Image: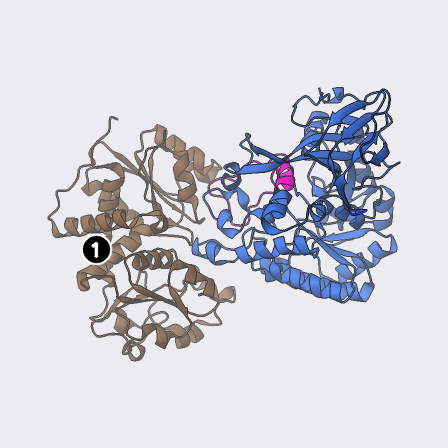
Chain colours: A blue, B brown
């Protein structure tokens, strides 16, 4: 079913009249794009003539943007069947994602080069979908005790190392992890959580959580680790990335570190930009996340940080299917993620219309920003001669999520911004059509 | 589909319903009210945390109203064998339970369970969240001694962080217009608890100053092991209520405690047994409060079996 998506028409494709946004070059203009039959961008320019044999596609009033680069999403377990993997990739494709870094928090965790090679290999034969890049575990079994082989993992294609969402490891081990990562030029993506402070709780210790008689972890469980790690970054000179930042305190530390010229970065998830602790204590228990949803002020600070570039990327932390937690779920129970990749564009567009994020910066945080963090400078951009990994976004299309996969505070929402076309691997796909057989 | 009337938390109860329940509680105690009949109704008590007094109080209340009562104590509960709480509750419902009185150690469980069931769910205490019938009986106790709750100064002293009684009481008292102060060590009374509609202070003398009502909370011995209190002696020195400190309260102030009292720790014996203590009265009010709640949830009219 999914493998029937047609390749780019024989004579190529001509995207006409769209608003092209390419953060790598700072381009924001009405420009045509001609894609050749081999799936490369042949030309970008004003009012181009449709080459002979090429299929014209009117995309006026739409955004033509690079396909998104997602720093973290859960795709499938190593022994899930092909169909599951294909559906997981299809869901990400519909969200406008052209490249996805697959979370290593599977069972077993991706902690060896052989395991790291498996998913990308299988993805290549599972129909149209984003390119899959593996993330590797920082420690064996993600147990926080013995470091994985950064060099061999890198050679197996691993683009970053992370133990998310397990609590952070002791300081001496983290120091070594940063040193090895520097030696092999691989990014360390830290899930900052001091286990003795967090007690592995998936709620924030804030007014709403305390008033509801629930136990939570303080923001300091995150920022104490980041403060420690930044000193280790100063010591080792390694690149350091904080995954899913949740608190304003962490953002202050990251700003200070950047002022000190330390090579640090961070990302935020759509759920942390949309919700706060009050949503997590509502009757539905499935919004218990790690890191937890914190206070309204934290949410505002995260929005600001994504806008001013303190956070360089939005990462989905998408999970294809999570069974809801039972009514009597323990305080430490949490969901590894929710199917939210398709909310990223609407969240970014809302920041554009409501909070003054520039359109170019919005595109950057979901494409070129994460590509740069990974050192993958061919991705997340649009240029002549480059691969035509692109998305056509209708920024004004309104829609509702018809599935019941989202928890109540999100299920009722109306979203604005929708992926109309995806071009990946030389295939043109209309994500609104379940079959993936879209033709212009 | 789901029309059952639940009683889950003070936080989700309207002021009008609260006042009606309070009035009914008092009328039942005066022997003035026509006792509603729950004949033909089945009430199940599902206590997944040890309790004798609250369970007995609910059982007596249900029997007084003519309902049949089945108790599921943990030893006989299939939950021990791994059945999920939801499955157990649905089975009870299938057997004809009209109301399920739940106590659970995880906060929020009754509230999350209720929409999944057709039976009425009555919260008999959930984790450290709420114990709403206790708040109802506490309001009734106060009204037996004070003309109104509005405008009263009420101090709730002790381990507020781990107390469902404190959360329900604070919400109920604040809803009725009282000035509520929460007091205890910073480790057990974080500032964020002001979200309950109360003032937070760590100074006991300030909390007791001019108080009309003092609710002392039980301090569990475990708090020492987890480092939340340094020692029981230290705790008593800072936040134990004794006769000397009691002098700061308003004339005619009353002392309440949800029991069981830890004499010589949170409150001294001579105070707990003195004329200001209404601790045993609270227990008496519990019966009427729970009768009022069960009758309200089940509407006092029998359903077809």
State left or right for residue B229 relative to residue A380: left
Most extreme residue toward the left is: B32
The residue positioned 60% from the left and 44% from the top of the image is: A350
In the rendered view, tell whether residue B139 sits above or below residue B120: below
In the rendered view, tell whether residue B243 sits above or below residue B305: below
Of all chains, the one bearing label 1 is B
- Give the percent coordinates (x, y) of residue A397: 60, 33
Q: In the image shown, does B3 or A214 lie closer to the viewer?
A: B3
Which class describes the residues within 10 Å of circle 1: few (<14), some (14-19), or many (20+)? Answer: some
The residue positioned 62% from the left and 57% from the top of the image is: A195
Element assignment for label 1:
helix
Does residue A238 appear anywhere in the picture? Answer: yes
State left or right for residue B209 relative to residue A205: left
Residue B173's quadrant in the figure?
Answer: bottom left
Q: Which span of residues is magenta-colored?
A: A320-346
In the rendered view, tell whether residue A157 sits above or below residue A204: above
Q: Which residue is mark 1?
A: B284
Taken as a whole, is the magenta stretch helix, strand or loop?
A: loop
Q: In the image shown, does A350 or A229 lie closer to the viewer?
A: A350
Q: Is residue A188 magenta?
A: no
- Give the percent coordinates (x, y) of residue A205: 52, 58
Residue B200's quadrant in the figure?
Answer: bottom left
Q: In the image shown, does B48 or B116 lie closer to the viewer?
A: B116
Does residue A246 appear anywhere in the picture? Answer: no
In which quadrant is the C terminus of chain B drawn? Answer: top left
Q: Is residue A326 magenta?
A: yes
Residue B99's quadrant in the figure?
Answer: top left
- Give the percent coordinates (x, y) of residue A144: 71, 53
In which quadrant is the N terminus of chain B drawn? Answer: top left
Number of numbered discs: 1
């Amino acid at each position: 079913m999914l493998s029937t998506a047609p390749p780019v028409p024989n004579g190529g494709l001509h995207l006409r009249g769209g608003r092209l946004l390419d953060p790598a070059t700072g381009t924001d203009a009405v420009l045509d794009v001609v894609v050749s039959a081999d799936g490369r961008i042949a030309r970008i320019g004003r009012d181009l003539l449709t080459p002979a044999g090429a299929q014209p596609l009117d995309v006026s009033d739409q955004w033509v943007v690079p396909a998104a680069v997602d720093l973290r999403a859960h795709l499938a377990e190593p022994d899930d069947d092909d169909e599951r993997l294909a559906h997981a990739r299809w869901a990400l494709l519909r969200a406008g994602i052209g490249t996805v870094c697959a979370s290593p928090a599977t069972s077993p965790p991706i902690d060896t080069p052989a395991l790291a090679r498996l998913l990308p290999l299988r993805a290549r034969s599972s129909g149209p979908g984003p390119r899959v890049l593996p993330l590797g575990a920082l420690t064996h079994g993600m147990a926080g005790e013995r470091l994985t082989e950064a060099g061999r993992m890198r050679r197996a294609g691993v683009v970053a190392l992370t133990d998310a969402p397990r609590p952070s490891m002791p300081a001496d081990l983290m120091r070594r992890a940063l040193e090895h990562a520097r030696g092999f030029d691989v990014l360390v993506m830290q899930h900052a959580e001091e286990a003795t402070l967090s007690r592995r709780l998936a709620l924030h210790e804030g007014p709403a959580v305390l008033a509801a008689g629930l136990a939570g972890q303080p923001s300091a469980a995150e920022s104490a680790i980041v403060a420690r790690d930044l000193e280790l970054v100063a010591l080792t000179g390694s690149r350091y990335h904080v995954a899913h930042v949740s608190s304003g305190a962490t953002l202050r530390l990251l700003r200070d570190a950047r002022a000190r010229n330390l090579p640090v970065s961070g990302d935020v998830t759509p759920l942390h930009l949309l919700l706060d602790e009050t949503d997590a204590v509502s009757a539905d228990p499935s919004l218990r996340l790690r890191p937890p949803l914190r206070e309204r002020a934290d949410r505002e600070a995260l929005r600001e940080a994504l806008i001013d570039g303190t956070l360089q990327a939005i990462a989905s932390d998408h999970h294809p299917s999570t069974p809801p937690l039972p009514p009597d779920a323990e305080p430490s129970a949490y969901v590894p993620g929710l199917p939210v990749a398709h909310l990223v564009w609407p969240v970014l567009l809302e920041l554009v219309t409501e909070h003054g994020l520039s359109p170019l910066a919005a595109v950057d945080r979901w494409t070129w920003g994460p590509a740069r963090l990974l050192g993958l400078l061919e991705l997340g951009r649009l240029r002549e001669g480059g691969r035509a990994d692109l998305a056509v976004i209708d920024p004004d299309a309104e829609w509702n999520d018809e599935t019941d996969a989202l928890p109540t505070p999100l299920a009722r929402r109306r979203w604005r911004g929708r992926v109309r076309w995806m071009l990946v691997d030389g295939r043109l796909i209309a994500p609104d059509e379940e079959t993936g057989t879209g033709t212009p | 589909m789901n029309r059952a009337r639940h009683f889950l938390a003070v936080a989700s109860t309207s002021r009008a319903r609260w006042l009606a329940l309070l009035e009914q509680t008092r009328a039942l105690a005066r022997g003035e009210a026509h006792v509603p009949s729950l004949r033909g109704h089945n009430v199940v008590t599902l206590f997944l945390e040890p309790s004798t007094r609250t369970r007995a109080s609910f059982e007596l209340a249900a029997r007084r109203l003519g309902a049949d009562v089945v108790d599921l104590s943990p030893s006989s509960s299939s939950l021990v064998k791994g059945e999920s709480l939801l499955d157990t509750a649905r089975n009870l419902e299938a057997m004809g339970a009209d109301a399920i009185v739940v106590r659970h150690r995880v906060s929020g469980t009754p509230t999350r369970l209720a929409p999944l069931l057709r039976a009425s769910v009555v919260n008999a205490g959930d984790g450290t969240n709420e114990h709403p019938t206790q708040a109802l009986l506490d309001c009734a106790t106060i009204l037996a001694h004070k003309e109104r709750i509005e405008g009263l100064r009420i101090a709730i002293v002790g381990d507020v962080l781990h107390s469902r009684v404190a959360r329900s009481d604070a919400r109920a008292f604040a809803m009725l217009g009282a000035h509520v102060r929460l007091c205890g060590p910073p480790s057990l009374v974080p500032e964020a608890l002001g979200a309950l509609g109360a003032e937070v202070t760590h100074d006991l003398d300030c909390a007791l100053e001019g108080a009309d009502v003092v609710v002392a909370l039980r301090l569990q011995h475990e708090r020492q092991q987890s480092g939340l209190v340094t020692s029981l002696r230290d705790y008593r020195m800072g936040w134990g209520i004794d006769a000397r400190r009691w002098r700061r309260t308003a004339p005619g102030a009353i002392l309440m405690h949800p029991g069981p009292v830890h004499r010589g720790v949170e409150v001294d014996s001579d105070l707990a047994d003195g004329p200001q203590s209404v601790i045993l009265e609270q227990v008496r009010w519990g019966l009427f409060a729970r009768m009022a709640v069960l009758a309200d949830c089940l509407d006092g009219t029998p359903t077809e079996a």
